[in-house]
Amino acid sequence: MSAYRANAGYWFVAPAIILMIVILIVPVGIAAFLSFTDYALGNQGFEWIGLKNYENIVTRSSYNKMIWASVTYVLVVVPVSIGLGLGAALLINSVKRFGDVYKTIYFLPVMAALLAMAIVWEFSLHPSLGMVNKTLTSLCGSWVEGFFSWAWLPWADPANSWYAHGCKNGFPLWFGDKNYTMGTVAFIGIWQAFGFNMVLYLAGLTSVPRELYQAADMDGADTAWDRFRLVTWPMLGPTTVFVVTITTIRSFQVFDTVEAITDGGPSKSTYVMMYAIYEKGVQQNLMGVGSAITIAFLAFVLILTMGQRYLVERRVHYS
Amino acid sequence: MKRILSMTAAAAMLATPALAVDIEVGYPYSHLFDVTYEKIMKDFKKAHPDINVKFRATYEDYEDGTNTILRESVSGNLPDITMQGLNRQAILVEKGIARSLEPFIAKEADFAKDGYHKAMLSLSTFDNKVYGLPFSVSLPVGYYNMDLIRKSGSDKLPTSWDEVVELCGKMRANGVKNPMFWGWNITGNWFVQALLWSQDTPIIKDGQANFDGKEGLVAFETMKKLFRGCNMKNLSWKDALASFSAGEIGMMFWSTSALGAIERAKGDFELKTKEFPGITGAPKGLPAGGNAALLVSASKDPKRLEAAWTFLKFITSGVGAAAVAETTGYMPPNKAANEIILADFYKRNPNKETAVRQLPLLRDWLAYPGDKGLAVTQVLYDGIEGIVVGDKDDMKALQEELTEEVTELLPRR
Amino acid sequence: MKHAVLILGALIVILPFYVMTSYSLKSPREIETNTGGFFGAQEPMVNEYCVKLGNPREACVETPFIFNYTQAFKKAPLLRYLLNGVIVTASIFFIQVLIALPCAYALSKLRFRGREFVFSMVLFCLLIPVHAIALPLYVMLGKAGLTNTYAALIIPWTISVFGIFLMRQFFMTVPDDLIDAARMDGMTEFGIIWKVMLPTAIPALLAFAIFSVVAHWNDYFWPRIVITGDRDLYTPPLGMREFKGDADGSIWGPMMATATIIVTPLIVAFLLAQKRFIEGITLTGMK
């Protein structure tokens, strides 16, 4: 009996495996090979240069910035977008009316074409003409400024607050000031991602059996927090594994916002790994270098993901 | 008898329609040039009904154009003609993808008569052979918001960078928050090349970095003076153009190619353009921006190549070339077109004439040789950005640092 | 209280869409200078393109929002692109399900040697970003003569490791008894996939569908690399490219109109899927 099932198993995974190899793994193999050469697109041939590309990655400062940018982005976007996604899913699940409306609105960022959204964000965040700064400026001198510059706290110094400073000297160049750019890009990343996580959590919430809540009630769990802690969160285990893995991976793969708006700048503050690969491999046609960054990227992310899985998978329930 | 026969034969030949030849063309900046090609094609079809021109998917920008051709050369489906940025021709010539036009030019009776003067052709000449015909050309100019300029007390426009800084100071004193934007972040290090050509110095000489000398230092110091003296903000050029159109920036130094867009979108202020300021006195040369037509056909069919050449000639001379100025902010570098066909047009559009007056200063928009050419562009970009945001203050040190990095990336001699 | 929070969130989320739709109604000047409220003043504007072709200015005056939307359809064959979008995303999803579901089932419910290895392979492939493999893949397709075809748009996406992972997680929550019962009724393993597993996993399948369709409908990078000769094969986001102009100014109005148009089918599809979503839950019963 189990031999029959094992056979079925092989047949079922075979097409997937073949496609994985041809479409995904072979190109990676080619990239790995090219990473040891100096191939540039359009050349007739190439030279073997060994580990030189990798050496450059470790020594050149722009690559340090690359790792820093990628790590910062992931550390900000993953927890926040998962938290917001979960929160939104729970809230929407618990309201009786308009659930559909909220769901659609929160999912809109995921559905919009990125090119258009990038342009819109660029406009909205224009230092002097964009809606965000214009609104902030128009509120200067009103009670809103007082509120945000902490004037209502007795020990605060409102004239030195961020908001007051902005009113006097102009609000930040959201994409031009290297202190703000990464934050702005991360904000856009969260804006896009949390709707995605929300939908996943909504799907997961549907598989939590009602009876468990009733059982918990009878055991004395009466607050919403108790219900969440004892029933919802554990039952969302598999979903959470999925969400965390996917969000982390996708955050490492962030690219579109950077390509459309910041080009890795200013001063390479948003020079994330995927953008570096694109810049070197596609824009500058240096396929050898681009491939080396790709392999380094894969190795880096692989180690992180394996570590994460090990830690998380141990604590998860499957029914 | 013989005469009648040959005349009949000739008549018969003229009566049968010649077999149509197909050629494929790729060009960038769809919304800019679609209208240009539409206009040109009307005349082209009348003059050459036997040539069918198929336009391919347009390139997003010059870099995309080059990358697409590189990809297509690897996968084997190149078009016949491609319009490439002037500084992107070198890569295609180096890799043997662009074909020399000398054989075709040799067959022409009087090429120069059609307005192809030497300065124009030199933009597409590599190793003493002509590989392309420049189609649309732009030069750096100064855009001035006269309303804001008058706030400084006079309406005299600057002719040197020192005067620009002075004007900045006066405008700031009179309440203009953002007096100037300088296009350091335009593609291909164009403005750095402008500062060097202003001193008659190319940025690359004999394949080596040429900004490590006195002229290079002057260029860096000028930039630092401008950025600091005018308190220039680190805006992306898209944001800067929007700001200028909205009337927030007093002076903007950018390519003449944006003139059309700005005139269309600007608020209620008087716009004037004037020649690009010089360092001490007028500039001695300025890099040409824009694109040229290259022949990249992989076809061996002589009829096809002939048809391609006919198209190439048509769009870069006569009425074809004039369409460029009439429909975009670029100019045709063709002398005959500018002086004869467009004379009236420029009188009616004086802002567009500024760039034309600078035509005698036309110099190459140089590309860095070797595979890492584009990486070099990025290195210089990053360096200048450092000056803009205030990270770099010692220009001599910056000059040395950049020379070292760039030399490492260029092919060894 | 809950509604207050949700509404605040909704406002932040919806800001870019407000801007996008608003710009699709405005004239170039209003866009560049950011004036005009939501609908724009709708003062007649001059269609520069028409003027450049040689027509007199008076004949070229139009109202902004009409101009924007008609340009969106005229400049590029947008309807054709939308059709391409439908063909490509539907084909991709269909093939993805065919390949992913059996694989997910095998990985979650069947025991065979090498099962963990295959799953690790799936996870590894998840890490591989498309930009990294785009060029080698392009060259491979080029040598096979498949560039500039529907095949090039579809084939690379037929393997969805995301889908396999998602469905496997979901299948693991299906009780084994359900499957054993089906086996005792004589069903083949293959039959079990489509008749037992699939119905229980409708919500997850819908989530998979949503992600797949949205991702491929909006994909800009890959089609741009692979379709270079023939505009007829463009997918919707490439339609916006017609209006992109970089240094010399893009034409924002029609571009935003295009963006609004191409996001609309997705919103409609999502709303419809919502209904099935709820039906799907009630059909499978409260587990």
Image (cartoon, coloured by chain):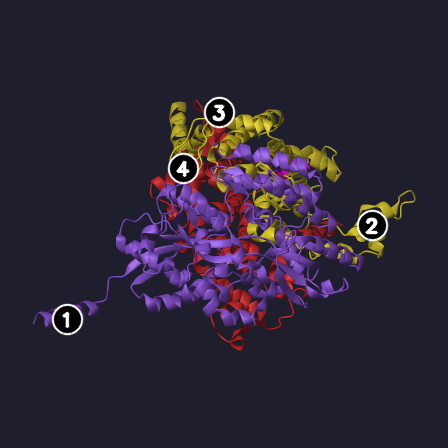
Chain colours: A yellow, B purple, C red
Is A53 on the left-hand or right-hand side of A15?
Answer: right
Q: Chain of mark 4?
A: A
Percent of width and height locating residue A235: 63, 34
A4 with respect to C287 (left or right): left
At a point 48% along the width and 69% down the height, the residue shown is B342
Mark 2 belongs to which amino acid? Ala
Q: Amino acid at mark 3?
A: Glu
Cα gap from disc 1 to disc 2, whole angstroms = 91 Å
Which quadrant, please, contains the C terminus of chain A? top right
Dot in front, 2 or 3: 2
The mark nearer the N terminus, 4 or 2, is 4
Q: Which residue is mark 4?
A: A43
Q: Position of residue C97 (x, y in %)?
A: 44, 41
Q: Residue furthest right?
A: A154
Q: Which residues are magenta?
A: A206-214
Secondary element type, mark 4 = loop
The disc at residue B7 is 1
Same chain under badges 4 and 1? The reply is no
Does residue A136 appear left or right of residue C90 in this picture? right
- Label 1 vs label 2, nearer the camera: 1
| Residue A259 screen position, x and y as percent | 57, 45
**Which one is in front, A251 or B408?**
B408
Judged from this view, the residue extending furthest toward the left is: B1
- The answer for how far apart the CA atoms under marks 4 and 2 are is 56 Å
Q: Is residue B43 at all visible to an observer of this figure?
A: yes
- CA separation in Å, label 4 and label 3: 42 Å
Q: Which residue is mark 2?
A: A164
> In the rendered structure, the residue with mark 1 lies on which chain?
B
Kindly give the residue lying farthest to the front in the view shown. Answer: B281
Secondary element under disc 1, as helix, strand or loop, is helix
* Chain ID at mark 3: C
